[in-house]
Protein backbone atom coordinates (compact mmCIF):
# COMPACT_ATOMS: atom_id res chain seq x y z
CA UNK A 1 0.00 0.00 0.00
CA UNK A 2 1.32 3.48 -0.79
CA UNK A 3 1.97 5.61 2.23
CA UNK A 4 -0.42 8.42 3.04
CA UNK A 5 2.55 10.69 3.54
CA UNK A 6 6.16 10.02 2.73
CA UNK A 7 8.71 12.63 3.68
CA UNK A 8 12.36 12.29 2.73
CA UNK A 9 15.10 14.48 4.12
CA UNK A 10 13.02 17.61 4.45
CA UNK A 11 14.85 20.81 5.30
CA UNK A 12 13.32 24.23 5.69
CA UNK A 13 14.54 27.64 6.81
CA UNK A 14 12.41 30.72 7.24
CA UNK A 15 13.42 33.81 5.27
CA UNK A 16 15.10 35.19 8.38
CA UNK A 17 17.51 32.26 8.29
CA UNK A 18 15.93 30.24 11.07
CA UNK A 19 16.42 26.52 10.44
CA UNK A 20 13.01 25.21 11.43
CA UNK A 21 13.29 21.72 9.91
CA UNK A 22 16.63 19.97 9.65
CA UNK A 23 16.29 16.67 7.89
CA UNK A 24 12.88 15.09 8.53
CA UNK A 25 12.22 11.52 7.38
CA UNK A 26 8.70 10.38 8.09
CA UNK A 27 6.40 7.81 6.58
CA UNK A 28 2.78 7.70 7.62
CA UNK A 29 0.57 4.83 6.53
CA UNK A 30 -3.04 5.21 5.47
CA UNK A 31 -5.44 5.17 8.38
CA UNK A 32 -2.82 5.91 11.02
CA UNK A 33 -3.31 8.48 13.74
CA UNK A 34 0.03 10.05 14.51
CA UNK A 35 0.76 12.51 17.28
CA UNK A 36 3.50 15.04 16.68
CA UNK A 37 4.77 16.27 20.00
CA UNK A 38 7.57 18.59 20.95
CA UNK A 39 8.20 21.80 22.87
CA UNK A 40 7.34 25.25 21.51
CA UNK A 41 9.45 26.10 18.51
CA UNK A 42 10.22 22.45 17.75
CA UNK A 43 8.93 22.85 14.20
CA UNK A 44 5.54 21.13 14.48
CA UNK A 45 3.59 23.90 12.76
CA UNK A 46 6.26 24.27 10.12
CA UNK A 47 6.06 20.56 9.36
CA UNK A 48 2.28 20.59 9.06
CA UNK A 49 2.41 23.55 6.68
CA UNK A 50 4.56 21.42 4.36
CA UNK A 51 1.94 18.71 4.03
CA UNK A 52 -0.13 20.65 1.53
CA UNK A 53 2.58 22.77 0.05
CA UNK A 54 1.93 26.01 1.93
CA UNK A 55 5.62 26.01 2.77
CA UNK A 56 8.04 24.29 0.44
CA UNK A 57 11.40 23.24 1.77
CA UNK A 58 14.06 21.12 0.14
CA UNK A 59 13.65 17.34 0.16
CA UNK A 60 10.77 15.24 -1.02
CA UNK A 61 7.19 14.95 0.13
CA UNK A 62 4.73 12.57 -1.46
CA UNK A 63 1.07 12.35 -0.59
CA UNK A 64 -0.48 9.03 -1.61
CA UNK A 65 2.50 8.53 -3.88
CA UNK A 66 2.05 11.91 -5.56
CA UNK A 67 4.99 14.29 -5.22
CA UNK A 68 4.07 17.79 -4.14
CA UNK A 69 4.81 20.22 -6.92
CA UNK A 70 3.00 22.91 -8.85
CA UNK A 71 0.95 20.49 -10.93
CA UNK A 72 -0.17 18.27 -8.06
CA UNK A 73 -0.83 21.05 -5.58
CA UNK A 74 -4.50 21.41 -6.36
CA UNK A 75 -5.35 17.77 -5.87
CA UNK A 76 -3.12 17.46 -2.81
CA UNK A 77 -4.88 20.36 -1.14
CA UNK A 78 -8.13 18.50 -1.65
CA UNK A 79 -6.69 15.43 0.07
CA UNK A 80 -4.89 17.10 2.95
CA UNK A 81 -7.01 19.22 5.27
CA UNK A 82 -4.98 21.49 7.53
CA UNK A 83 -6.72 22.94 10.57
CA UNK A 84 -4.80 25.94 11.86
CA UNK A 85 -4.18 26.55 15.51
CA UNK A 86 -6.08 29.82 15.76
CA UNK A 87 -9.68 29.50 14.54
CA UNK A 88 -9.66 33.22 13.81
CA UNK A 89 -7.14 32.51 11.07
CA UNK A 90 -9.27 29.73 9.68
CA UNK A 91 -12.61 31.52 9.81
CA UNK A 92 -12.41 34.63 7.69
CA UNK A 93 -15.91 34.87 6.25
CA UNK A 94 -18.79 36.82 7.66
CA UNK A 95 -20.92 33.71 8.14
CA UNK A 96 -20.19 30.15 9.25
CA UNK A 97 -21.87 28.79 6.12
CA UNK A 98 -19.63 30.74 3.76
CA UNK A 99 -16.53 29.54 5.53
CA UNK A 100 -17.45 25.88 5.47
CA UNK A 101 -18.59 26.13 1.83
CA UNK A 102 -15.39 27.91 0.81
CA UNK A 103 -13.26 24.79 0.29
CA UNK A 104 -15.86 22.73 -1.60
CA UNK A 105 -16.63 25.66 -3.92
CA UNK A 106 -12.93 26.05 -4.68
CA UNK A 107 -12.67 22.40 -5.66
CA UNK A 108 -15.27 23.04 -8.33
CA UNK A 109 -18.38 21.58 -6.75
CA UNK A 110 -21.74 23.03 -7.72
CA UNK A 111 -23.65 25.25 -5.31
CA UNK A 112 -26.02 22.40 -4.38
CA UNK A 113 -23.21 19.92 -3.76
CA UNK A 114 -21.24 22.44 -1.77
CA UNK A 115 -24.30 23.32 0.32
CA UNK A 116 -24.92 19.65 1.03
CA UNK A 117 -21.30 19.14 2.05
CA UNK A 118 -21.46 22.20 4.26
CA UNK A 119 -24.53 21.03 6.12
CA UNK A 120 -23.04 17.57 6.46
CA UNK A 121 -19.74 18.85 7.85
CA UNK A 122 -21.48 21.17 10.30
CA UNK A 123 -23.65 18.29 11.50
CA UNK A 124 -20.57 16.13 11.91
CA UNK A 125 -18.94 18.61 14.27
CA UNK A 126 -22.21 19.26 16.09
CA UNK A 127 -22.69 22.77 14.74
CA UNK A 128 -25.79 22.28 12.61
CA UNK A 129 -28.05 25.32 12.84
CA UNK A 130 -25.18 27.80 13.09
CA UNK A 131 -25.03 28.39 9.33
CA UNK A 132 -25.89 32.07 9.50
CA UNK A 133 -23.88 32.85 12.62
CA UNK A 134 -21.04 35.33 12.55
CA UNK A 135 -17.76 33.78 13.75
CA UNK A 136 -17.17 36.45 16.37
CA UNK A 137 -20.43 35.57 18.05
CA UNK A 138 -19.29 31.99 18.66
CA UNK A 139 -17.45 30.68 21.69
CA UNK A 140 -13.87 29.57 21.24
CA UNK A 141 -14.85 25.90 21.35
CA UNK A 142 -17.54 26.49 18.74
CA UNK A 143 -15.09 28.32 16.50
CA UNK A 144 -12.73 25.38 16.80
CA UNK A 145 -15.47 22.99 15.72
CA UNK A 146 -16.40 25.15 12.77
CA UNK A 147 -12.71 25.33 11.80
CA UNK A 148 -12.64 21.58 11.64
CA UNK A 149 -15.84 21.61 9.59
CA UNK A 150 -14.25 23.99 7.06
CA UNK A 151 -11.81 21.22 6.30
CA UNK A 152 -14.14 18.23 6.67
CA UNK A 153 -16.41 19.69 4.01
CA UNK A 154 -13.64 19.01 1.50
CA UNK A 155 -13.65 15.32 2.53
CA UNK A 156 -9.90 15.15 2.99
CA UNK A 157 -8.17 11.77 3.26
CA UNK A 158 -5.61 13.25 5.62
CA UNK A 159 -6.41 15.60 8.48
CA UNK A 160 -3.59 17.67 9.93
CA UNK A 161 -4.48 19.52 13.11
CA UNK A 162 -2.27 22.10 14.77
CA UNK A 163 -2.67 22.30 18.55
CA UNK A 164 -6.35 21.38 18.44
CA UNK A 165 -6.88 21.66 22.20
CA UNK A 166 -5.14 24.97 22.83
CA UNK A 167 -7.30 27.51 24.68
CA UNK A 168 -10.18 25.08 25.22
CA UNK A 169 -11.76 24.64 28.61
CA UNK A 170 -11.88 21.07 29.98
CA UNK A 171 -15.37 20.31 28.75
CA UNK A 172 -14.75 21.72 25.27
CA UNK A 173 -11.51 19.78 25.21
CA UNK A 174 -13.25 16.53 26.08
CA UNK A 175 -15.86 17.10 23.38
CA UNK A 176 -13.14 17.86 20.88
CA UNK A 177 -11.23 14.67 21.70
CA UNK A 178 -14.43 12.74 21.21
CA UNK A 179 -15.05 14.46 17.88
CA UNK A 180 -11.53 13.85 16.62
CA UNK A 181 -11.71 10.22 17.71
CA UNK A 182 -14.86 9.77 15.64
CA UNK A 183 -13.30 11.06 12.40
CA UNK A 184 -12.02 8.35 10.13
CA UNK A 185 -9.32 10.06 8.06
CA UNK A 186 -5.58 9.53 8.48
CA UNK A 187 -4.72 11.96 11.25
CA UNK A 188 -1.70 14.00 12.19
CA UNK A 189 -2.09 15.91 15.40
CA UNK A 190 0.56 18.40 16.46
CA UNK A 191 0.23 19.21 20.11
CA UNK A 192 1.97 19.42 23.42
CA UNK A 193 -1.20 18.22 25.09
CA UNK A 194 0.19 14.74 25.73
CA UNK A 195 -2.95 13.25 27.30
CA UNK A 196 -4.84 14.21 24.15
CA UNK A 197 -2.25 12.52 21.95
CA UNK A 198 -2.40 9.55 24.26
CA UNK A 199 -6.10 9.18 23.76
CA UNK A 200 -6.15 9.69 20.01
CA UNK A 201 -2.92 8.40 18.53
CA UNK A 202 -1.32 4.97 18.40
CA UNK A 203 1.93 6.36 17.17
CA UNK A 204 3.88 9.37 18.35
CA UNK A 205 6.67 11.32 16.74
CA UNK A 206 8.77 13.49 19.02
CA UNK A 207 10.18 16.55 17.34
CA UNK A 208 12.74 18.93 18.76
CA UNK A 209 14.75 21.71 17.09
CA UNK A 210 13.64 20.58 13.67
CA UNK A 211 14.66 16.93 13.92
CA UNK A 212 12.78 13.78 14.86
CA UNK A 213 14.12 12.69 18.21
CA UNK A 214 11.90 9.65 18.66
CA UNK A 215 9.27 7.79 16.68
CA UNK A 216 7.37 4.89 18.18
CA UNK A 217 4.18 3.69 19.76
CA UNK A 218 2.48 6.28 21.90
CA UNK A 219 2.60 3.99 24.92
CA UNK A 220 6.37 3.55 24.68
CA UNK A 221 7.11 7.22 24.22
CA UNK A 222 4.71 8.41 26.90
CA UNK A 223 6.26 6.06 29.39
CA UNK A 224 9.79 7.19 28.65
CA UNK A 225 9.94 9.87 31.31
CA UNK A 226 13.61 10.60 30.73
CA UNK A 227 13.08 11.15 27.01
CA UNK A 228 10.13 13.47 27.55
CA UNK A 229 11.89 15.51 30.18
CA UNK A 230 15.04 15.77 28.09
CA UNK A 231 12.85 17.35 25.42
CA UNK A 232 11.08 19.82 27.69
CA UNK A 233 7.84 17.88 27.84
CA UNK A 234 5.96 16.83 30.90
CA UNK A 235 5.35 13.12 31.35
CA UNK A 236 1.69 12.14 31.66
CA UNK A 237 0.83 10.80 35.12
CA UNK A 238 0.66 7.02 34.95
CA UNK A 239 -2.88 6.76 36.25
CA UNK A 240 -3.81 8.55 33.04
CA UNK A 241 -1.86 6.34 30.69
CA UNK A 242 -2.95 3.06 32.22
CA UNK A 243 -6.61 3.69 31.63
CA UNK A 244 -6.32 4.39 27.97
CA UNK A 245 -9.42 3.47 26.04
CA UNK A 246 -8.72 1.01 23.24
CA UNK A 247 -8.76 2.66 19.82
CA UNK A 248 -10.48 1.04 16.92
CA UNK B 1 -13.90 40.03 25.26
CA UNK B 2 -17.38 40.90 24.14
CA UNK B 3 -18.03 43.93 22.02
CA UNK B 4 -21.39 43.42 20.47
CA UNK B 5 -22.07 47.13 20.19
CA UNK B 6 -21.58 47.18 16.46
CA UNK B 7 -24.09 44.60 15.34
CA UNK B 8 -26.11 44.23 18.43
CA UNK B 9 -29.64 43.96 17.08
CA UNK B 10 -29.04 42.32 13.74
CA UNK B 11 -29.86 38.85 15.09
CA UNK B 12 -33.46 39.62 16.14
CA UNK B 13 -36.22 37.60 14.53
CA UNK B 14 -38.72 40.32 13.60
CA UNK B 15 -40.59 40.43 10.27
CA UNK B 16 -38.26 43.21 9.18
CA UNK B 17 -35.19 41.14 10.03
CA UNK B 18 -36.66 38.30 7.99
CA UNK B 19 -36.86 40.33 4.79
CA UNK B 20 -34.39 39.74 2.01
CA UNK B 21 -31.47 42.18 2.33
CA UNK B 22 -32.09 43.39 -1.21
CA UNK B 23 -35.62 44.42 -0.30
CA UNK B 24 -34.31 46.48 2.56
CA UNK B 25 -31.45 47.97 0.58
CA UNK B 26 -33.76 49.08 -2.23
CA UNK B 27 -36.44 50.41 0.13
CA UNK B 28 -34.01 52.34 2.28
CA UNK B 29 -32.18 53.82 -0.69
CA UNK B 30 -35.52 54.89 -2.17
CA UNK B 31 -36.43 56.40 1.18
CA UNK B 32 -33.23 58.42 1.23
CA UNK B 33 -33.82 59.57 -2.35
CA UNK B 34 -37.39 60.55 -1.57
CA UNK B 35 -36.29 62.53 1.46
CA UNK B 36 -33.35 64.21 -0.19
CA UNK B 37 -35.35 65.34 -3.23
CA UNK B 38 -38.17 66.81 -1.16
CA UNK B 39 -38.08 70.63 -1.45
CA UNK B 40 -36.80 72.60 1.50
CA UNK B 41 -39.15 73.78 4.19
CA UNK B 42 -41.80 71.09 3.70
CA UNK B 43 -41.58 70.06 7.30
CA UNK B 44 -44.98 68.40 7.30
CA UNK B 45 -43.76 66.01 4.61
CA UNK B 46 -40.63 65.30 6.60
CA UNK B 47 -42.88 64.49 9.52
CA UNK B 48 -44.69 61.92 7.40
CA UNK B 49 -41.38 60.40 6.33
CA UNK B 50 -40.38 60.21 9.97
CA UNK B 51 -43.61 58.40 10.81
CA UNK B 52 -42.98 55.93 7.99
CA UNK B 53 -39.49 55.04 9.16
CA UNK B 54 -40.62 55.02 12.79
CA UNK B 55 -43.22 52.41 11.91
CA UNK B 56 -40.51 50.23 10.40
CA UNK B 57 -38.40 50.65 13.53
CA UNK B 58 -41.29 49.67 15.78
CA UNK B 59 -42.02 46.62 13.61
CA UNK B 60 -38.37 45.56 13.80
CA UNK B 61 -38.31 45.60 17.59
CA UNK B 62 -35.06 47.56 17.65
CA UNK B 63 -35.30 50.12 20.48
CA UNK B 64 -36.20 53.54 19.03
CA UNK B 65 -33.77 55.20 21.41
CA UNK B 66 -30.91 53.08 20.06
CA UNK B 67 -31.64 54.17 16.51
CA UNK B 68 -32.09 57.81 17.52
CA UNK B 69 -28.85 57.91 19.45
CA UNK B 70 -27.02 56.52 16.50
CA UNK B 71 -28.58 58.77 13.90
CA UNK B 72 -27.90 61.82 16.05
CA UNK B 73 -24.23 61.09 15.49
CA UNK B 74 -24.54 62.66 12.05
CA UNK B 75 -26.05 65.84 13.45
CA UNK B 76 -22.78 67.63 14.30
CA UNK B 77 -21.58 67.18 10.73
CA UNK B 78 -24.83 68.29 9.20
CA UNK B 79 -25.23 71.18 11.59
CA UNK B 80 -21.70 72.37 11.01
CA UNK B 81 -22.48 72.76 7.35
CA UNK B 82 -25.98 73.98 8.00
CA UNK B 83 -24.79 76.59 10.47
CA UNK B 84 -23.36 78.65 7.64
CA UNK B 85 -26.52 78.59 5.61
CA UNK B 86 -28.31 81.42 7.44
CA UNK B 87 -25.35 83.58 6.52
CA UNK B 88 -25.97 83.02 2.85
CA UNK B 89 -28.63 84.84 0.97
CA UNK B 90 -29.87 84.07 -2.46
CA UNK B 91 -29.58 87.10 -4.65
CA UNK B 92 -31.91 87.95 -7.46
CA UNK B 93 -29.83 86.30 -10.17
CA UNK B 94 -29.77 83.03 -8.27
CA UNK B 95 -26.21 83.51 -7.07
CA UNK B 96 -25.57 83.23 -3.39
CA UNK B 97 -23.73 85.91 -1.47
CA UNK B 98 -22.35 85.71 1.99
CA UNK B 99 -23.20 88.29 4.64
CA UNK B 100 -19.83 88.22 6.29
CA UNK B 101 -20.81 90.31 9.26
CA UNK B 102 -23.89 88.14 9.44
CA UNK B 103 -26.03 90.19 11.73
CA UNK B 104 -28.87 89.97 9.31
CA UNK B 105 -29.64 86.28 9.50
CA UNK B 106 -31.69 85.16 6.63
CA UNK B 107 -35.02 83.46 7.33
CA UNK B 108 -34.76 81.47 4.17
CA UNK B 109 -31.31 80.38 5.24
CA UNK B 110 -32.68 79.22 8.56
CA UNK B 111 -35.31 77.12 6.83
CA UNK B 112 -32.61 75.67 4.62
CA UNK B 113 -30.47 74.81 7.62
CA UNK B 114 -33.38 73.14 9.35
CA UNK B 115 -34.19 71.19 6.22
CA UNK B 116 -30.64 69.99 5.94
CA UNK B 117 -30.57 68.82 9.51
CA UNK B 118 -33.85 66.98 9.14
CA UNK B 119 -32.82 65.38 5.86
CA UNK B 120 -29.51 64.27 7.31
CA UNK B 121 -31.22 62.81 10.32
CA UNK B 122 -33.81 60.92 8.28
CA UNK B 123 -31.25 59.55 5.83
CA UNK B 124 -29.00 58.39 8.65
CA UNK B 125 -31.96 56.77 10.38
CA UNK B 126 -32.81 54.79 7.26
CA UNK B 127 -29.26 53.49 6.99
CA UNK B 128 -29.21 52.58 10.67
CA UNK B 129 -32.49 50.72 10.33
CA UNK B 130 -30.97 48.82 7.43
CA UNK B 131 -27.84 47.85 9.33
CA UNK B 132 -29.62 47.13 12.60
CA UNK B 133 -32.06 44.73 10.99
CA UNK B 134 -29.69 42.94 8.62
CA UNK B 135 -26.74 40.76 9.42
CA UNK B 136 -23.62 42.16 7.87
CA UNK B 137 -23.01 38.96 5.94
CA UNK B 138 -26.51 39.13 4.50
CA UNK B 139 -26.01 42.77 3.60
CA UNK B 140 -22.89 41.85 1.65
CA UNK B 141 -24.74 39.00 -0.04
CA UNK B 142 -27.48 41.43 -0.99
CA UNK B 143 -24.98 43.87 -2.44
CA UNK B 144 -23.27 41.04 -4.28
CA UNK B 145 -26.55 39.94 -5.80
CA UNK B 146 -26.97 43.55 -6.86
CA UNK B 147 -23.69 43.26 -8.77
CA UNK B 148 -21.32 45.29 -6.64
CA UNK B 149 -17.69 44.39 -7.39
CA UNK B 150 -16.65 41.25 -5.53
CA UNK B 151 -13.25 42.55 -4.51
CA UNK B 152 -14.85 45.50 -2.79
CA UNK B 153 -17.25 43.22 -0.94
CA UNK B 154 -14.41 40.91 0.03
CA UNK B 155 -12.53 43.84 1.55
CA UNK B 156 -15.63 44.89 3.45
CA UNK B 157 -16.13 41.35 4.62
CA UNK B 158 -12.57 41.03 5.92
CA UNK B 159 -12.86 44.41 7.55
CA UNK B 160 -15.98 43.39 9.37
CA UNK B 161 -14.60 40.01 10.41
CA UNK B 162 -11.25 41.24 11.67
CA UNK B 163 -12.36 44.57 13.06
CA UNK B 164 -13.69 42.73 16.10
CA UNK B 165 -10.44 40.87 16.57
CA UNK B 166 -8.43 44.06 16.30
CA UNK B 167 -10.70 45.77 18.82
CA UNK B 168 -10.33 42.78 21.07
CA UNK B 169 -6.58 42.84 20.78
CA UNK B 170 -6.31 46.54 21.46
CA UNK B 171 -8.64 46.21 24.44
CA UNK B 172 -6.41 43.51 25.90
CA UNK B 173 -3.25 45.46 25.21
CA UNK B 174 -4.75 48.54 26.81
CA UNK B 175 -5.74 46.56 29.86
CA UNK B 176 -2.23 45.18 30.16
CA UNK B 177 -0.85 48.69 29.86
CA UNK B 178 -3.19 50.13 32.45
CA UNK B 179 -2.44 47.37 34.91
CA UNK B 180 1.21 48.39 34.87
CA UNK B 181 0.67 52.12 34.59
CA UNK B 182 0.99 54.03 37.85
CA UNK B 183 0.16 57.51 36.66
CA UNK B 184 2.65 58.24 33.92
CA UNK B 185 2.76 61.57 32.15
CA UNK B 186 1.05 62.53 28.93
CA UNK B 187 4.14 62.15 26.80
CA UNK B 188 4.87 58.67 28.06
CA UNK B 189 1.28 57.61 27.54
CA UNK B 190 1.40 58.88 23.99
CA UNK B 191 4.58 56.92 23.40
CA UNK B 192 2.99 53.72 24.70
CA UNK B 193 -0.04 54.40 22.54
CA UNK B 194 2.25 54.70 19.53
CA UNK B 195 3.86 51.38 20.40
CA UNK B 196 0.48 49.77 20.79
CA UNK B 197 -0.66 50.94 17.39
CA UNK B 198 2.57 49.63 15.92
CA UNK B 199 2.07 46.27 17.61
CA UNK B 200 -1.48 46.10 16.36
CA UNK B 201 -0.26 46.75 12.85
CA UNK B 202 2.42 44.05 13.03
CA UNK B 203 -0.01 41.53 14.47
CA UNK B 204 -2.58 42.29 11.82
CA UNK B 205 0.06 41.88 9.17
CA UNK B 206 1.07 38.50 10.56
CA UNK B 207 -2.52 37.45 10.83
CA UNK B 208 -3.21 38.35 7.24
CA UNK B 209 -0.43 35.99 6.24
CA UNK B 210 -1.93 33.12 8.24
CA UNK B 211 -5.43 33.83 6.99
CA UNK B 212 -4.14 33.75 3.46
CA UNK B 213 -2.39 30.44 4.15
CA UNK B 214 -5.58 28.97 5.50
CA UNK B 215 -7.44 30.14 2.40
CA UNK B 216 -4.83 28.70 0.08
CA UNK B 217 -4.97 25.43 2.04
CA UNK B 218 -8.59 25.17 1.04
CA UNK B 219 -7.92 25.67 -2.61
CA UNK B 220 -8.17 29.45 -2.92
CA UNK B 221 -6.83 30.51 -6.30
CA UNK B 222 -7.76 34.17 -6.37
CA UNK B 223 -11.30 33.62 -7.55
CA UNK B 224 -13.98 34.44 -4.98
CA UNK B 225 -16.80 31.94 -5.02
CA UNK B 226 -19.94 32.30 -3.01
CA UNK B 227 -23.30 30.68 -2.69
CA UNK B 228 -26.20 33.05 -2.58
CA UNK B 229 -28.91 31.79 -0.30
CA UNK B 230 -31.18 34.76 -0.78
CA UNK B 231 -34.83 34.37 -1.64
CA UNK B 232 -37.33 37.06 -2.44
CA UNK B 233 -40.62 35.89 -0.97
CA UNK B 234 -44.11 37.26 -0.55
CA UNK B 235 -43.32 39.28 2.61
CA UNK B 236 -40.69 41.07 0.54
CA UNK B 237 -43.25 42.01 -2.12
CA UNK B 238 -45.79 43.07 0.49
CA UNK B 239 -43.31 45.15 2.45
CA UNK B 240 -41.84 46.90 -0.58
CA UNK B 241 -45.28 47.53 -2.05
CA UNK B 242 -46.54 49.17 1.14
CA UNK B 243 -43.32 51.04 1.83
CA UNK B 244 -42.90 52.40 -1.68
CA UNK B 245 -46.59 53.33 -1.85
CA UNK B 246 -46.14 55.33 1.36
CA UNK B 247 -43.16 57.17 -0.08
CA UNK B 248 -45.00 57.91 -3.30
CA UNK B 249 -48.11 59.03 -1.42
CA UNK B 250 -46.10 61.45 0.68
CA UNK B 251 -44.45 62.94 -2.38
CA UNK B 252 -47.75 63.21 -4.25
CA UNK B 253 -49.37 64.84 -1.23
CA UNK B 254 -46.54 67.33 -1.36
CA UNK B 255 -47.50 68.36 -4.91
CA UNK B 256 -51.08 69.23 -3.92
N1 LIG C 1 7.04 33.02 10.16
C1 LIG C 1 8.20 32.70 10.76
N2 LIG C 1 9.33 33.40 10.48
C2 LIG C 1 10.49 33.09 11.06
N3 LIG C 1 10.67 32.10 11.93
C3 LIG C 1 9.59 31.36 12.25
C4 LIG C 1 8.31 31.62 11.69
N4 LIG C 1 7.44 30.72 12.19
C5 LIG C 1 8.15 29.94 13.03
N5 LIG C 1 9.44 30.31 13.07
C6 LIG C 1 10.52 29.68 13.84
O1 LIG C 1 10.66 28.35 13.40
C7 LIG C 1 10.82 27.46 14.48
C8 LIG C 1 9.72 26.41 14.47
O2 LIG C 1 8.48 27.04 14.70
P1 LIG C 1 7.10 26.27 14.72
O3 LIG C 1 7.04 25.37 13.57
O4 LIG C 1 6.05 27.32 14.83
O5 LIG C 1 7.19 25.46 16.08
P2 LIG C 1 6.05 24.75 16.92
O6 LIG C 1 4.80 24.75 16.13
O7 LIG C 1 6.58 23.38 17.19
O8 LIG C 1 5.92 25.52 18.19
C9 LIG C 1 10.80 28.30 15.73
O9 LIG C 1 12.13 28.53 16.12
C10 LIG C 1 10.16 29.57 15.30
O10 LIG C 1 10.65 30.66 16.03
MG1 LIG D 1 2.99 25.61 16.53
Image (tube, coloured by chain):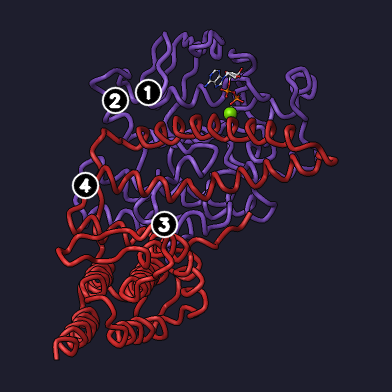
Chain colours: A purple, B red
Q: Position of residue A239 (x, y in %)?
A: 80, 42
* Relative to B140, A50 lies left or right: right
Residue A106 vs residue B239, the one in the foreground: B239
> Label 3 neighbourhood size at 10 Å, few (<14), some (14-19), many (20+)?
many
> Label 4 neighbourhood size at 10 Å, few (<14), some (14-19), many (20+)?
few
Instruction: Determine whether A229 is above or below A100 in the image.
Output: above
Circle 2 residue = A73
Q: Position of residue B145 (x, y in %)?
A: 20, 58
Q: Are marks 4 and 2 in contact (CB under 8 Å)?
A: no
Question: Subunit of mark 4?
Answer: B
Q: Are marks 2 and 3 in contact (CB under 8 Å)?
A: no
Q: Which mark is residue B149?
A: 4
For the point 42% across and 20% down, which residue is it? A55
For the point 60% across and 48% down, which residue is it? B168
- Callouts 3 and 1 in the same chain: yes
Of helix, strand and loop, which one carries label 4? Answer: loop
Q: Earlier in the sequence, mark 2 or mark 3?
A: 2
Question: Subunit of mark 3?
Answer: A
Q: Earlier in the sequence, mark 3 or mark 1?
A: 1
User: Do we see residue B117 in this rendering?
Assistant: yes
4 vs 2, front mark: 4
- Callouts 2 and 3 in the same chain: yes
Circle 3 residue = A122
Q: CA distance from mark 3 to mark 1?
A: 26 Å
Circle 1 residue = A53
User: Do we see residue B130 in this rendering?
Assistant: no
Of helix, strand and loop, which one carries label 2? Answer: helix
- Residue A232, located in which quarter of the rendered image? top right
Amino acid sequence: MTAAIDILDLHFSYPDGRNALRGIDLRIEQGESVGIIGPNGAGKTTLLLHLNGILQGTGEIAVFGLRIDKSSLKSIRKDVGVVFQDPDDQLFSSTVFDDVAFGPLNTGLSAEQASARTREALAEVGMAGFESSVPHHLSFGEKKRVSIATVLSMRPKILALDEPSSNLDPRQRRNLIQLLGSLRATKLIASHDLPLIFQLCDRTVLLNSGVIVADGTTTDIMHDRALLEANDLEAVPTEFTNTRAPQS
Amino acid sequence: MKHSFIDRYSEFGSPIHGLDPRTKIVCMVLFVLAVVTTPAGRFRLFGLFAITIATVIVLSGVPVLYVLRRSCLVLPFVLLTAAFLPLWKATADGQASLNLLGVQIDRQGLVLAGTMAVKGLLAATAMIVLSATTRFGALLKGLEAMRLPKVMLMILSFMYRYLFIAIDQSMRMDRARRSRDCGSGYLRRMRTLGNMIGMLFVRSYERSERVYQSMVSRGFDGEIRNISRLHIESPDYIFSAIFITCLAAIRVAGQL
